[in-house]
């Protein structure tokens, strides 16, 4: 409801409530952008720009639709664009340690239960590294699916891509992580295929 | 482990990387908004300064007006342009502008016999801009025009008086002399092409001397016009034309259907269309590559050609509906691209929109653009802004270039989204 009031005022040219929207979503937005960019300054820059775009494009926003996915689509789109420019993807041939590999194993097969291995601070950092190892496009789908918790159907709508494409992207992200597992642990087949 | 667990693990990891307490973007957002607003204002101010010193030459070739309204920017009336913060269009203070100099200058016209009307008077009577030949056919003289109902007849005669040529036309109506044609036998009517448009030709021997009649339909005028100002006289719909040649047997032009078809072509092609070149030729002239519609969009649009305005290094691509059915569907668009080192307004009314024009800020090709609907209509008292739905335009800036995409349909059925989708497809 607070979002709706803020958006309505923004549409009337009143920027007063933009600050409340910034305060409400800046952390989640910066974190989402960071997961794609792995550069804090750049992530904050992207999110600042996204809020400016929000103010400028608010007339295009349909108030009957939820605000959060609409706004985070801007954030992830811009982060992806910035990431493409950065080309900071870590080589897939780089070796992972075992903890990261187990997280990646979970991405391939959610039935495994590696969470006990994910409690250590060090391990969490490794998770970030695992995601960073993906190409920017796949980081984006991982962020949307596992961080923003969009369903595959929602992702299909927001990204204007067929559901089959989304599924393929996610599967490919898992496959790439699977490749890293086999590199680091000598595992055999990619279970996602 | 389910998705919720992953999310919380990621949240904790990210909180360690970038603590929430360290994120405060509001000041940065606020500063950017202020800076962007200043840029808008500076751009607008620069545009107005540019206008004062620019004088666009007006080119007129028989019917086509390549109009430039320099006076709009050099006279007090020119100051009516508002200081808006629009980035790609310039809003005027009024929907009406003063009569333009080139409108005050009459075109050279022949002496009109008392029984004839001038073209201007005849067009006023029928209420539309009639098509004439790009240049008067060699050996013929324009005698003038007359009007019967909604049909305008333009009369030409040869110097020796042995040949007469009549170009008759109606806007959005039946063919001239439709009743007469209904009496012709189908087997005597020959199907022909006038440019890409279907036509019919018949030798009418019931007259003395016999005459040739050629009729066809085509989009009403300069379709689509290349810029906002040139579209001012554009109307949705189609013209139904008939070209009638009547010559005595000792005339060189006697029953020459080939010449008649060639003449008809000259009412179809406008100067700007005749000057279209290939994209490669245009690109070599402007010195940069242009965005264009990939071939896989051929089902919807076909490239007609490109043109260049060397003064601004502006390249224009023209696309039609592929079946050549512009008469019926009217579907077409133009894409203008020129460097941002050149002014935003490449002709004086090209970026100007009426005071009442509604601007919509749009998202296009990952940037912000503007959308407007309407044209400047040329009237006897000066340009008047009309929010016609038939022409819709978007503008945006990308990689150091201005872009303008204008789309047309005769029924105004195309939408803002159609323009955006088309723009998104450009590569």
Image: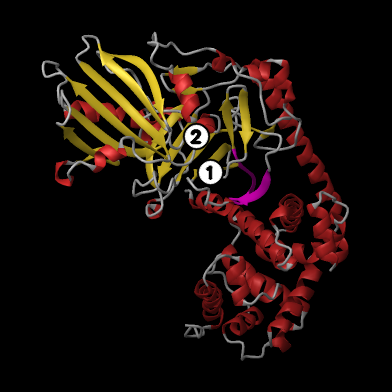
- What is the distance, in whole Å, between disc 2 and disc 1 at their CAs? 9 Å
| Residue B84 position (above or below residue B161) | below
Taking the spot 40% from the left edge, 11% from the top edge, the residue there is B114
Taking the spot 63% from the left edge, 59% from the top edge, the residue there is A77
On residue B234, the disc is 2
Furthest-left residue in this view: B250
Which chain contains the residue that carries disc 2? B
Q: Nearer the viewer, residue B226 or B220?
A: B220
**Image side of residue B295 versus residue B58, left or right:** left
Q: How far from the left and from the top, in percent, is residue A136?
A: 59, 63
Residue linked to disc 1: B390
**Image side of residue A109 versus residue B321, left or right:** right
Q: Secondary structure at mark 1?
A: loop
Most common secondary structure along the magenta stretch? strand
Chain part drawn in magenta: B359-374
| Residue A91 position (above or below residue B173) | below
Q: Are marks 2 and 1 on the same chain?
A: yes
**Numbered label tally:** 2
Q: Is residue B91 magenta?
A: no
Q: Is residue B366 magenta?
A: yes
Q: Callout 1 environment at 10 Å: few (<14), some (14 to 19), or many (20+)?
A: many
Q: How far from the left and from the top, in percent, is residue B420?
A: 56, 51
| Residue B144 position (above or below residue A10) | above
Q: How far from the left and from the top, in percent, is residue B92?
A: 70, 30
Q: How far from the left and from the top, in percent, is residue A170?
A: 56, 75
Asked whether the viewer can see residue A67, the reply is yes
């Amino acid at each position: 409801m607070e979002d709706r009031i803020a958006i309505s005022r923004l549409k009337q040219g009143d920027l007063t409530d933009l600050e409340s929207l910034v305060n409400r979503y800046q952390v989640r937005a910066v974190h989402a952008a960071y997961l794609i960019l792995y550069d804090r300054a750049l992530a904050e820059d992207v999110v600042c720009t996204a809020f400016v775009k929000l103010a400028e494009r608010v007339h295009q926003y349909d108030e009957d639709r939820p605000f959060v996915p609409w706004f985070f689509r801007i954030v992830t789109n811009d982060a992806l664009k910035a990431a493409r420019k950065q080309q900071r993807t870590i080589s897939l041939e780089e070796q992972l340690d075992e903890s990261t590999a187990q997280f990646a194993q979970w991405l391939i097969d959610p039935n495994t239960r590696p969470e006990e291995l994910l409690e250590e601070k060090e391990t969490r950092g490794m998770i970030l590294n695992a995601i960073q190892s993906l190409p920017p496009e796949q980081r984006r789908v991982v962020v949307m699916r596992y961080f923003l918790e969009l369903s595959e159907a929602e992702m299909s709508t927001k990204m204007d891509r067929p559901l089959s494409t989304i599924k393929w992207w996610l599967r490919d992200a898992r496959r790439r992580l699977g490749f890293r597992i086999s590199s680091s642990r000598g595992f055999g087949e990619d279970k996602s295929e | 482990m389910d998705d919720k667990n992953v999310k919380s693990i990621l949240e904790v990891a990210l909180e360690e990387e970038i603590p929430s307490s360290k994120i405060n973007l509001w000041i940065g957002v606020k500063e950017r908004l202020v800076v962007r607003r200043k840029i808008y204002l500076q751009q607008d101010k620069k545009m107005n300064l540019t206008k004062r010193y620019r004088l666009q030459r007006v080119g007129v070739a028989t019917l086509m007006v390549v109009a430039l309204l320099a006076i709009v920017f050099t006279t007090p009336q020119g100051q009516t342009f508002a200081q808006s913060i629009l980035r790609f269009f310039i809003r005027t203070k009024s929907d009406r502008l003063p009569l333009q100099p080139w409108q005050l200058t009459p075109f050279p016209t022949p002496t009109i016999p008392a029984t004839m009307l001038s073209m201007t008077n005849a067009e006023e009577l029928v209420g539309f801009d009639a098509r004439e030949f790009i240049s008067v056919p060699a050996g013929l003289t324009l005698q003038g025009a007359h009007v019967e109902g909604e049909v305008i007849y333009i009369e030409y005669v040869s110097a020796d008086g042995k040949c007469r040529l009549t170009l008759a036309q109606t806007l959005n109506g039946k063919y001239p002399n439709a009743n007469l044609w209904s009496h012709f036998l189908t087997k005597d009517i020959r199907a022909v092409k006038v440019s890409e448009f279907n036509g019919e030709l018949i030798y009418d021997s019931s007259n003395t001397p016999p005459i040739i009649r050629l009729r066809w339909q085509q989009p009403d005028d300069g379709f689509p016009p290349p810029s906002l100002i040139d579209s001012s006289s554009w109307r949705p719909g189609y013209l139904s034309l008939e070209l009638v040649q009547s010559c005595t047997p000792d005339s060189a032009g006697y029953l020459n259907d080939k010449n008649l078809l060639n003449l008809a072509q000259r009412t179809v092609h406008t100067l700007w269309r005749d000057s279209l070149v290939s994209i490669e030729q245009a690109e070599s002239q402007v010195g940069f590559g242009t965005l264009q519609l990939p071939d896989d969009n051929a089902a919807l649009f076909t490239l007609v050609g490109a043109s260049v305005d060397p003064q601004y290094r502006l390249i224009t691509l023209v696309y039609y509906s592929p079946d050549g059915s512009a008469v019926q569907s009217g579907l077409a668009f133009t894409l203008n691209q020129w460097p941002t080192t050149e002014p935003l307004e490449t002709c004086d009314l090209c970026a100007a929109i009426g005071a009442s024009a509604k601007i919509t800020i749009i998202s296009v090709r990952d940037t912000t653009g503007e959308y407007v609907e309407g044209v400047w209509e040329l009237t006897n008292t000066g340009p008047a802004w009309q929010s016609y739905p038939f022409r819709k335009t978007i503008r945006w800036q990308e990689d150091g270039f201005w872009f303008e995409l204008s789309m047309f349909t005769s029924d105004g059925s195309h939408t803002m989204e159609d323009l955006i989708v088309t723009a998104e497809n450009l590569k």
